[in-house]
Amino acid sequence: MIIDRAEVIVTSPDRNFVTLKITTSDGVTGLGDATLNGRELAVVAYLREHVVPLLAGRDPHRIEDAWQFLYRSAYWRRGPVTMAAIAAVDMALWDIKGKVTGLPVYQLLGGASREGLLAYGHASGKELPELFDSVREHLADGYRAIRIQSGVPGLKAIYGIASQASDTGGGEARYDHEPARRGELPVQEDWDTRAYLRHLPGVFEAVRHEFGPELPLLHDGHHRMTPIQAAKLGKDLEPFDLFWLEDCTPAENQEALRLVRQHTTTPLAIGEIFNTVWDFQDLIREQLIDYVRGAVTHMGGITPLKKTIDYAAQYQIKSGFHGPTDISPVGMAAQAHLGLAIHNFGIQEYMPHGEKTNQVFEQSFTWQDGLLHPGDQPGLGVTLDTDEAGRYPYERAYLPYNRLADGTMHDW
Ligand code: KDG
Ligand code: MG
């Protein structure tokens, strides 16, 4: 059996997704997610022009070798575009191996280490009553861990708050809020870190008061603080016992995490925009983080993310794979198989996809009692309905961006 062909499928049911489909000479197909939110077509070109021509004739069983070949032979290494493209090939080959052996991918990775994956959902609200309602809705949906994002007085739209019809100019209210408006230029939002730092501890105090001490609570700082601001927030949030504080500072300056660590025992999670084990190397070895946020789709696939998380295990650092809706159902399935198999699983982010997306991608995924399970179909357990996918052509879409009150660009 050899790889016969590979094709890149772009579809935009609720948002854009890029999928690689590899077909073998025996007619077995494998899917891989290559979605890079807001820069999708760069990965499409990388795959179509530079990767697809290299695949025909290769042995699909040689996953490690294919990965090393694509990583090393390009000479130019790393980066989100390159690694998303390699990730798609890696996932598709694991999918094929599962189908050929008749086993779900988690069995090939060592078998299940648990019954299912603890997953957290996204509660949000501009004001406390709206936020509390959102927490209650998530509890009713079975979530046993919840991320809390809140409005900040004086700021209009902020990261992580579900948009209402009134926010989208009368358009569709969106829970998955990014990109804000498809087909348009990026939306500008406003930001004030001092106002945020003043407001957030009170929000967590109120949530703890309302929902008690047991519920695991998470928060995403979305790269917006300086190291000393992040240290202060971590310290201020200590009484509310967070499961984690995510992306408290921009990831480029990794020394920042050392400073934050010196000041607070609030657990830290980072890495949703990282691409390789090298991005995590110092943070893991020096135990500057508690959770690895890499996604299978952006870390180059199941193969390298497993190596990264196995390395983290030596330091009791756990997984917290990135799972917003810009990870396609294929990418979510791939990391659910990995999460089920590894010993040092921590938690999985889970933002359910929209109805149209679920019609394009049929999934064996289950969600029960707050636990995700990738299902027991051979391979990844996802099929792509190409006719349905063809109904939703690509639409250019951008993430929002931030400016401070005086017009200075800030991290979004
Ligand atoms: O594409 C950007 C999103 O994936 C990101 O903003 C979501 O930070 C995010 C999260 O933690 O889910
Ligand atoms: Mg995040």
Image (cartoon, rainbow, N blue to C red):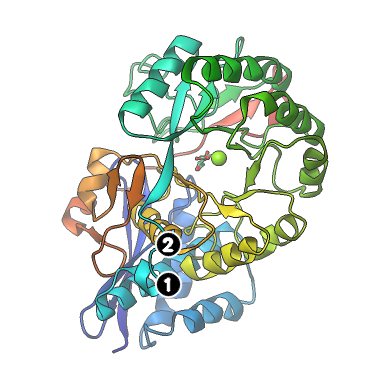
| Residue count near mark 2 (Cα–Cα under 10 Å), binned few <14, some 14–19, many ≥20 | some
Q: Which residue is mark 2?
A: 113
Q: Where 131 falls versus 244 (above or below)?
A: above
**Disc 1 residue lies near ligand 1 with CB under 8 A:** no
The foreground one among 216 and 257 is: 216
The foreground one among 383 and 15 is: 383
Asked if residue 27 shows in the view, the reply is yes
Q: Where 372 falls versus 262 (above or below)?
A: below
Identity, as a three-letter code, of the amino acid under mark 1: Gly
Identity, as a three-letter code, of the amino acid under mark 2: Ser
The foreground one among 16 and 155 is: 155
Apparent side of residue 122 relative to residue 81 in the rendered image (left or right): left
Mark linked to residue 55? none
Seen at 50% across and 29% down, the residue is 214
Seen at 50% across and 71% down, the residue is 303
Apparent side of residue 329 relative to residue 408 in the rendered image (left or right): left
Q: Nearer the viewer, mark 1 or mark 2?
A: 2
Q: Please, what secondary structure does the residue beneath circle 1 have?
A: loop
Task: Report x, y in % for residue 120.
Answer: 44, 38
Q: Please, what secondary structure does the residue beneath circle 2 have?
A: loop
Asked if residue 391 shows in the view, the reply is no
Q: Quadrant of the C terminus?
A: top right
Q: Which residue is mark 1?
A: 110
Q: Are marks 1 and 2 in contact (CB under 8 Å)?
A: yes
Task: Report x, y in % for residue 179.
Answer: 44, 35
